[in-house]
Image (spheres, helix red, strand yellow):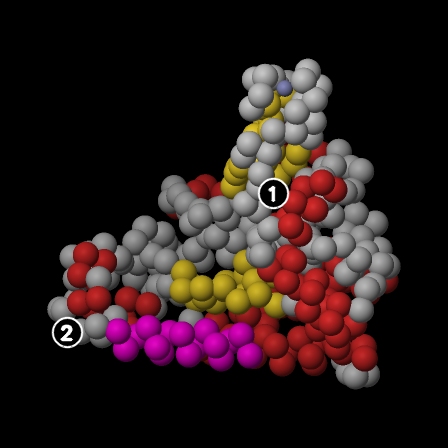
Amino acid sequence: MASMYKKYKRVVSPMGCRAFLSPWFERGGMNPADENDKPIFVGRFNIGAISLHLPMIYAKAKKESKDFYEVLDYYMELIRQLHKRTYDYLGEMKASINPLAFCEGGFLGGHLGIHDKIRPILKSSTASFGITALNELQELHNGKSLVEDGEFALEVMEYINKKIQAYKNEDGILYAIYGTPAENLCGLQVKQFRKKYGIVANVSDKPYVSNSFHCHVSEQIGPIEKQDLEGRFWDLFNGGKIQYVKYPIDYNTEAVETLINRAMDKGFYEGVNLSLSYCDDCGHQELNMDVCPKCGSKNLTKIERMNGYLAYSRVKGDSRLADHKMEEIKDRVSM
Ligand SMILES: [Zn+2]
């Protein structure tokens, strides 16, 4: 995003919490027609993300004595075919299904007649391959976390990037790589893994897996270390990513500002995780508490980061978040 702004003065806005569109050039399409061609990000969209289950793929390869990359190829090809099917399915829709978008210029190229099919408008849309549980993949590989190692995770991501570049060239489709936030998926993936491969320490022994390329939430690391460790993966997730750190430092605005400036220098899309809790019985406020220290109430309302968003993790003591996500929130140290 930073390089697009520096070079073309064009802003790549996130869609939702962290999805970003790959560049689409005004004249050249997927690649610039010449050095004056400019990317366009407005009026475009993504048609969906399908996430790889990397620890599962790794365990399957091991169990069946196959090469990890051979099994990975199979699932990447599967996702590729699903995306193609989605383009074909959507492409048959008539512009009249959404006249504002497809006939009145709401979407890029959206000046079709009501009876036209929308296929031409889809060419600037992206389709994403999601990645989650990179930390657990590294753990499964050699028993080390992304903080202790990360080389294998990097190698896998470089492989996936090369493969998707080849898919893009072959299919003429803007595939993208997305660091999946995995709200429900982070719990589902563990259930799927356990069913086939049981409980493996630091892989499937918690009710959730890690979000995208993020370090495990329980790691005892400082914000600078976390920025650097996750920065290794930054350019390998251009279709969707966020870097954030938790600031258990009260409202030390100078410290927060320093870390944001550091993130900006690195070209990150940076999230600031400051939690806020307040007691619905006595009104006491604190950055983080599970029991009110003033009156002992558990009737609390809490705001915390839920993947990309700041959300109510609790309202009057109750939560609408999935159990596995609440477990993750409990384990948070550095996230
Ligand atoms: Zn209270």
Residue 209 image position (x, y, % from top left): 70, 56
Instruction: Report the residue at 57% width, 41% height from top.
Output: 319
Residue 254 appears in the picture as rendered: no
Report which residue position mark 1 lands on: 243
Instruction: Report the residue at 80% width, 69% height from top.
Output: 198
Where does the magenta region start and end? 78-93
Ligand 1 lies in which image quarter?
top right
Disc nearest the viewer among 1 and 2 = 2
Q: Secondary structure at mark 2?
A: loop
Instruction: Report the residue at 83% width, 63% height from top.
Output: 200
Quadrant of the rendered structure where residue 86 is?
Answer: bottom left
Q: Nearer the viewer, residue 16 or 7?
A: 16
Q: Nearer the viewer, residue 196 or 85?
A: 196
Query: How many discs appear?
Result: 2
Residue 50 image position (x, y, % from top left): 53, 67
Residue 186 appears in the picture as rendered: yes
Q: Is mark 2 within 8 Å of ligand 1?
A: no
Q: Nearer the viewer, residue 176 or 169?
A: 176
Q: Amino acid at mark 2?
A: His
Q: Residues within 10 Å of mark 1 (few under 14, many from 20)?
A: many
Q: Per the image, is 45 magenta?
A: no
Q: Per the image, is 87 magenta?
A: yes
Q: Secondary structure at mark 1?
A: strand
Instruction: Report the residue at 61% width, 29% height from top.
Output: 299
Residue 131's tag is: none
Quadrant of the rendered structure where residue 56 is?
Answer: bottom right
Q: Earlier in the sequence, mark 1 or mark 2?
A: 2
Tell me if residue 123 comes above or below residue 228 in the rendering: below
Residue 115's tag is: 2
How far is disc 1 from disc 2 in space, using C-alphas?
Answer: 44 Å
Quadrant of the rendered structure where residue 285 is?
Answer: top right
Q: Is mark 1 within 8 Å of ligand 1?
A: no
